[in-house]
Image (spheres, rainbow, N blue to C red):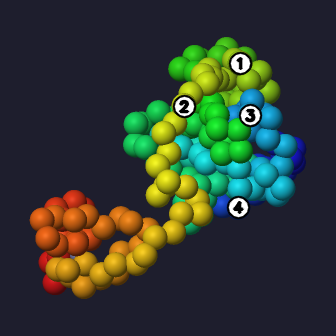
Amino acid sequence: MQTLAEYEVLAEAAHGHLCAGQILGLRMALYGVELLGIEDPTGADRKRLVTYVEIDRCATDAIPIVTGCRLGKRALKFRDFGKVAATFWDLARDRGVRVVARESAKQRAAELYPEISNRNRQQMRAYREMADEELFAHAWVRVAIGPEDLPGYKAPRVVCARCGEGVSFKREVVVGSETLCRSCAGESYYTVVG
Ligand SMILES: [Zn+2]
Ligand SMILES: [Zn+2]
């Protein structure tokens, strides 16, 4: 593991700026990894972790800096619950911990550093220094991860009977006698306009 200051440099480069959310995300991931007893998440233990994030804001960008869990490795999952929270699942020990930022953290930052008028700077300072228990609540949880959601899962590639596009990793849907992609099966998030 590296120091928080070292992770901050990496997070700033990845996210485009350093902000209170980055510090919070780094601390959240460090806490989760520590609770699980994982010592080298991006090295020797790089295949052990799957992370579920619950918000698409600053903190989420910082979490993979510590965990090494990335969308392109199928090790980062997004559940859009609008919460500054993440669950860290250890595949080797089949156990997980969910860490959530306390609602009181912002207020505590204001109490600790009333002389810093810039809220972001006030929170950055406080979030570096506050104890894990003051910043976060945590709970041990179980997550039912289907085999198709595991990082190394493979399945035959199929071609959608309607649009002809290839579908990997068993994401196809069988509707009646047809094998379709999720888009043609009615789950599309877009409509073609051109
Ligand atoms: Zn940010
Ligand atoms: Zn299709």
Disc nearest the viewer among 4 and 2: 2
- Mark 2–mark 3 Cα distance, whole angstroms, equals 13 Å
Decide if residue 83 is on the left or right side of residue 107. Answer: left
Decide if residue 141 is on the left or right side of residue 189. Answer: right
Q: What's under tag 4, amino acid-wise?
A: Ala
Disc nearest the viewer among 4 and 3: 3
Decide if residue 125 is on the left or right side of residue 155. Answer: right
Q: Quadrant of residue 163?
A: bottom left
Q: Earlier in the sequence, mark 2 or mark 1?
A: 1
> Badges 4 and 3: C-beta atoms under 8 Å apart?
no
Under circle 3, the secondary element is helix
Q: Quadrant of the C terminus?
A: bottom left
> Badges 4 and 2: C-beta atoms under 8 Å apart?
no
Decide if residue 166 is on the left or right side of residue 129. Answer: left
Q: What's under tag 2, amino acid-wise?
A: Arg
Q: Earlier in the sequence, mark 4 or mark 1?
A: 4
Q: What's under tag 3, amino acid-wise?
A: Leu
Disc nearest the viewer among 2 and 3: 2
Under circle 2, the secondary element is loop
- The circle drawn on residue 36 is 3
Q: Which residue is mark 4?
A: 13
- The circle drawn on residue 142 is 2
Q: Which residue is mark 1?
A: 133
Question: Callout 2 environment at 10 Å: few (<14), some (14 to 19), or many (20+)?
Answer: few
- Mark 4–mark 2 Cα distance, whole angstroms, equals 33 Å
